[in-house]
Image (spheres, rainbow, N blue to C red):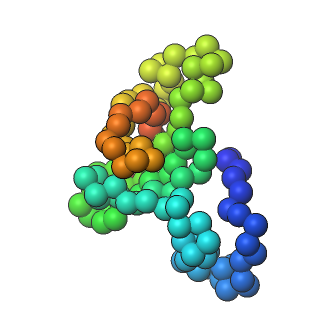
Amino acid sequence: MMHFELGSEKSGPEARESLEATFAQLVKTQRARIGYHEKLDHYGIKLGNGNMLEWAKDMSKNDKDLVFVLNPEPFILAGVDPAKIQGWTFAKVETKDDAGKTVFVDKLLKAFDLK
């Protein structure tokens, strides 16, 4: 479980009606948290501290339908070798920094094919 603040703006009652309505409210109030990775054709939501949840735009064309992305830094600071965490892939991931420049950062990835 990860906890993060969605802001101080209250959601309307319609946001509780469905996942789509909740997500629409999130996009409306926290647009900076939502992204699209064109090269991999997937969307993502920033959960804070370098953690994300990503999902395929089209599951029929993507072998990674859902990906949990974790910042490995807390594990490294605790003395854990992130490359040895079973069930997770430790990798350099292409992303863009705040200036829009392409950079590679260390991440822990857990991908799921939901088909």
Residue 111 visible somewhere in the drawing: no
Q: Position of residue 76 (x, y in %)?
A: 57, 20
User: In this rendering, is residue 103 above or below 27?
Assistant: above
User: In this rendering, is residue 29 above or below 6?
Assistant: below
Residue lying farthest to the top in this orientation = 79
Q: Nearer the viewer, residue 95 or 42?
A: 95
Residue 91 visible somewhere in the drawing: yes
**Which residue corresponds to the image point at 71% horizontal and 57% vertical from the top-left?**
5
Q: Position of residue 6 (x, y in %)?
A: 68, 62
Residue lying farthest to the bottom in this orientation = 14
Q: Position of residue 38 (x, y in %)?
A: 28, 57
**Which residue corresponds to the image point at 57% horizontal and 75% vertical from the top-left?**
28
User: In this rendering, is residue 26 above or below 37?
Assistant: below
**Which residue corresponds to the image point at 59% horizontal and 51% vertical from the top-left?**
47
Q: How many marks?
A: 0
Q: Position of residue 98 (x, y in %)?
A: 45, 47
Classify residue 84 as left or right of residue 102: right
Q: Assign the C terminus to one quadrant of the image.
A: bottom left
**Which residue corresponds to the image point at 32% horizontal and 42% vertical from the top-left?**
102
Residue lying farthest to the front in this orientation = 99
Q: Nearer the viewer, residue 84 or 41?
A: 41
Quarter assignment of residue 61: bottom left
Classify residue 73 as left or right of residue 42: right
